[in-house]
Image (tube, rainbow, N blue to C red):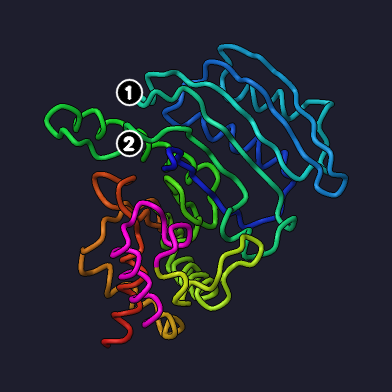
Amino acid sequence: MGTELKISMRMQNRVPVRQSFVRLVRALASAPVKLDCWGSVSWYNHEKASCRRVELLKTGCAPEEIAATIEHSTELNNTIDMMRGELSTDATWLLNTGATSLCLNAWTLGIYTRPVELLDGHIEVWLPRIGSFMEPANQAKDSHLIEENLELLIQLLVALIDSLAPATLSVFAGDGMHHPLNANAIWFPNHNAILEQLAFIALLSHEGCPDWKLAPLALPECANDRWAFHEWRNEMQRHHLWQRLSSNIGKYSSVTNDTIDQVLATHKFDVYHIGEGLLLFNYPYLVNGFVDDFFLTLLETTLSS
């Protein structure tokens, strides 16, 4: 079973990957992350199939100092396609997760096909372990610690959204294809972003993603696919999700802003407003649930209206 958590962001504009990476590092300055040691940074040129890695080994650095080091490095140039940074953080930020590191990834627009870009985004923050973000088995013993962790995680999401203004931000935990139905949380800057995500679900339902060997989600062969519909769902849950999706996805283009407003007005879903946008997740245990019911309810509301 996968134990990692990924915060994936898709950006709106094409910028050099080093600029994206520096913006990501600077975004941590307003997040509840105390940097202790920056380990290394590596970069990749897709066309030349070349990779470089530099050990920075800086201790006690503020995000701005790390960003400036990367920004002014003579080792880097604007032709690179991908960057990865590994850093350790103050262990108290993650409380009892046992994870004391973060990994930051950024890659340029256009080096992958559009379905892959929509699945994987362009900027990513990766945490290796999620145990202390999960709903505890012993509520009386651990629940307050988990809730504190989750509040810090939400603060991190808000800081990334405020600093980077991504087209979308999605949280994924465990093993499963990174599409909206498997997301644990999604941020939408506006209603149009919700409609775009729904159209993407329709694309995956009808065409799949050949680059990732993902069959069309609406096909019967996907009904119990642990990769397509996530390993954390049991067989009955995966089949129920597939059934609702395959029965209703054909009407996705009928969903409108009014449909979204109607569904949100039911207060069935947990929403955290950030500016004009909204962060959708299951409160209080964000990591334990998925947001698939929101999209399926939009489709079913259209069918019943």
| Residue at image location 34% in from the left, 33% down from the top | 131
CA–CA distance between discs 1 and 2? Answer: 9 Å
Which stretch did the figure color magenta?
224-248
Q: In the displayed structure, would residue 129 be above or below residue 16?
A: above
Residue 96's tag is: 1
Check disc 2 and report the residue beneath it: 133
In the rendered image, residue 255, in percent from the top left (x then y), is placed at 40, 80
Is 46 left or right of 199, judged from the image as shown? Answer: right
- Using the image as rendered, state which of residue 181 and residue 85 is in the foreground: 181
Q: In the displayed structure, would residue 233 be above or below residue 244?
A: above
Secondary structure type for disc 1: loop
Quadrant of the frame with the C terminus: bottom left
In the rendered image, residue 275, in percent from the top left (x then y), is placed at 40, 53
Q: How crowded is mark 2: few (under 14 residues within 10 Å), some or many (20 or more)?
A: many
The type of residue carrying mark 2 is Phe
- Using the image as rendered, state which of residue 2 and residue 170 is in the foreground: 2
Residue 178's tag is: none
